[in-house]
Image (cartoon, helix red, strand yellow):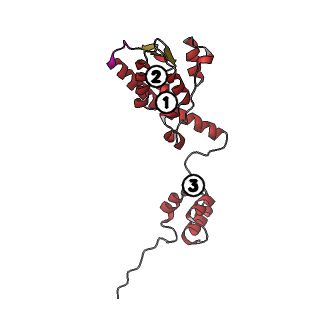
Amino acid sequence: MGDQLAALKAAGVLERYVYIDRMPAGGRQATRRRPSDLVEREAVLADLRSGVRLVVASLSVIGRSEQDIGATVWQVLAAGASVYARERDLTIDVETGREIVKAEIAAAAKALMRSRPDEARKVLSKLVEGGAVKVGRRPAVQALPPEKQEAARQDWLTNRALSREQVAEKYGVSAGALKNAFGNRLMPRRRRERSTK
């Protein structure tokens, strides 16, 4: 966000004319959001007049998808305004060729897709640093001390008082790791002897 504000200031945009919509980096909230939820962007688009220049840090910040970015750019052009993308020092106006506009929209959509994992990683790292989220794989059963392995085996195969998840939590490993190490829950691994009657 700071980089985008710096780019706008460098382009000569006064702070009172900066409009900011904040979208979640990922997850359920991001997938439930619609382009119309970008309230500030919608306000700017509704206020466009012929000859006005919409300055953005990058074309990728004006939409949530290639279709959304394209719709926004075409709406600006239909109003007789232009879009200036500071990152590429690019102006798109009514005189810009249609194929060039399409190529720039596609490039912006690719940049948007590349930036999303970075944004999600930044959010996750802040949560991890704050202790709100634990990340990483749980250790395998083989990493447990031998006495804990045997106790885990007994709990997994015979202890009906604990659920799969409770056993996994008790030993700090996943239920899948316990199943891989000891077989199906409450079913000891034994060869069945065939009756030959």
Residue at the limit of the structure toward the left, as seen here: 99
Mark 3 nearby-residue class (10 Å; few <14, some 14–19, many ≥20): few
Image x and y of residue 132, in percent: 65, 44
Residue holding disc 2: 59
* Local SS, label 3: helix
Residue 143 image label: 3
Image x and y of residue 127, in percent: 63, 40
- The amino acid type of the residue labelled 2 equals Leu
At a point 44% along the width and 20% down the height, the residue shown is 76
* Local SS, label 1: helix
Give the Cα separation between the discs numbered 2 and 1: 13 Å
First to last magenta residue range: 94-98
Q: Is residue 92 above or below residue 174?
A: above
At a point 48% along the width and 66% down the height, the residue shown is 183
- Closer to the N terminus: mark 2 or mark 1? 2
* Front residue of this view, candidates 1 and 62: 62
Image x and y of residue 6, in percent: 59, 17
- The amino acid type of the residue labelled 1 equals Ser
Is the residue under label 1 in contact with that under label 2 (CB below 8 Å)?
no
* Front residue of this view, candidates 120 and 16: 16
- Closer to the N terminus: mark 3 or mark 2? 2
